[in-house]
Amino acid sequence: MLPVSHAIGGNADIIYDYEASLDYPEHSLLLEATLADGTNQRRMEMEPVSRHLGNYLIATKNYKSFCIFVTNNLHINVLSDFRNRKTIIYYNTQDYDDFVSGMKIIPINTSDLRSIIKNRIKHIDIYKKFEKAYQCNENNPKRWYDEYVSFS
């Protein structure tokens, strides 16, 4: 269980499928991870992460699915870009009548991932927290992250 390479291009790094329960709908959680930081992070990750989730949503039609983006250092503009994917339409390039109206991409830093693992936080709690973060109206990306996303 110690990876020695990253996932091949074109798909998310890891996809977890969850059956519907009393607490959440059937959905998939796409996990995207990077070691890039600074401006390279925005340049290297914003487009592929959005594309992977957008294409996944279009292919599966399960619009409850979402993505967690994990990195050592969250760049403020990556936070802003991924937060604002909530309001951006993503189109199927083969059929412009097929699109996703908004995407849930939740960026987290590795210290928050460490807290999730260390504290054995269950998926239901992560799902509820990230759904609340997605639905809130906070527009400042730093405040949004600190108040709604962070587990620290």
Image (tube, rainbow, N blue to C red):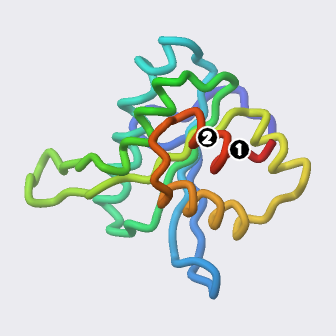
Residue 81: quadrant of the picture: top left
N-terminal label among 1 and 2:
2
Q: Is residue 96 left or right of residue 138?
A: left
Badge 2 is on which residue? 145
Q: Position of residue 24 (x, y in %)?
A: 58, 77
Task: For the residues labelled 1 and 2, say whether their Cβ atoms are less than 8 Å apart.
Answer: yes
Type of residue at label 2? Tyr
Name the side, left or right, on which 65 lies relative to 89: right
- Label 1 sits on a secondary structure element that is loop
Which residue is identified by label 1?
Answer: 150
Res 82 quadrant in image:
top left
The location of residue 69, given as percent across then percent down, is 57, 39
- Is disc 1 surrounded by few (<14), some (14 to 19) or many (20+) residues within 10 Å? some
Q: Residue at x 60, y 34 (%)?
A: 33
If the image is split into quadrants, where does the C terminus sit? top right
Q: Amino acid at mark 1?
A: Ser
Q: Residues within 10 Å of mark 2 (few under 14, many from 20)?
A: many
The relative height of residue 53 versus residue 82 in the rendered view (above or below) is: below
Q: Give the distance between the C-alpha atoms of the residues marked 1 and 2, in whole angstroms.
A: 6 Å
Residue 95 lies, in percent from the top left, at 9, 54
Kindly state the secondary structure of the residue where label 2 is placed. Answer: helix
Identified at 49% across, 47% down, the residue is 138
Say which quadrant the N terminus sits in: top right
Disc marking residue 140: none
Q: Residue furthest right?
A: 118
